Amino acid sequence: MSDFFNDYFNVKRMIKETREYKQLTAHVDSMPEDYKFVFKKIQSYIWMFTSGAGYDMMEVQQGLVELFDSGISNGKNVLELTGDDVAAFCEELLSNCKTYTGNWKDKLNREIQEGIVNK
C-alpha cells in the first residue's frame, strides 16, 4: 500500500516532477523545428503506453532530450538519431519502462505458467 501512496499521492514528488517536466518542455521548445516535431510525436506515442504513475517516462524523455541535444550540437538530422522507423525506436525507449502492454504480457505469461503447472 505504501508503494501506491509513494507513486500516486506523493505531493513532493508530484511537484518536483511537474517542475522538471516544465523545464523539459521549455528546453524542447527551444530546439530546431524538426527535432521539436519528432520529440513531441515520440512523447505523444510513448505516453499512450504508460503504466502506473508514469514517472519512468520522465527519465525516458530526459534521455531523449540529451540524445537530441547531442545530435543538434553535432549537426545531425533528427532521423540520423532515431532511424527511419521511429516506432521501432520508441519501442526500444519503452523496453525498460512499465507499460500497459508489458503488464498484459506479464499477466498472460503468468496465467499460462500457473495453468500449466497446476495441470
Image (cartoon, grey):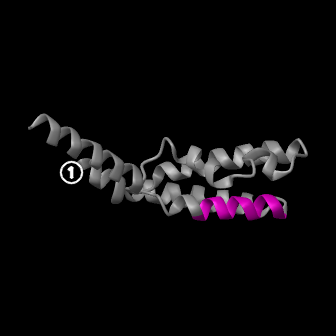
Q: Which residue is mark 1?
A: 1
Foreground of the two, 37 or 85: 85
Q: Position of residue 106 (x, y in %)?
A: 32, 45
Q: Position of residue 90 (x, y in %)?
A: 60, 51
Q: Amino acid at mark 1?
A: Met
Image quadrant in which the C terminus is located: top left
**Mark 1 falls on what kind of element?**
loop
Q: Is residue 7 magenta?
A: no
Is the magenta region chiefly helix, strand or loop?
helix
Magenta-colored span = 33-44
Q: Is residue 41 magenta?
A: yes
Residue drawn at x 9%, y 37% is 118
Foreground of the two, 32 or 25: 32
Disc count in the image?
1
Q: Position of residue 14 (x, y in %)?
A: 45, 59
Taking 112 as reference, is 15 left or right?
A: right
Pick out the residue farthest to the top. 117
Image height of 118 relative to 27, above or below = above
Taking 45 as reference, is 28 left or right?
A: right
Tell me if mark 1 has few (under 14), some (14-19) or many (20+) residues whose alpha carbon lies within 10 angstroms of its own: few
Taking 70 as reference, is 11 left or right?
A: left
Pick out the residue farthest to the left. 119
Residue drawn at x 55%, y 52% is 58
Question: Which image quarter: residue 110?
Answer: top left
Foreground of the two, 110 or 11: 110
Q: Position of residue 25 (x, y in %)?
A: 67, 62
Residue drawn at x 28%, y 48% is 108
Taking 101 as reference, is 107 left or right?
A: left
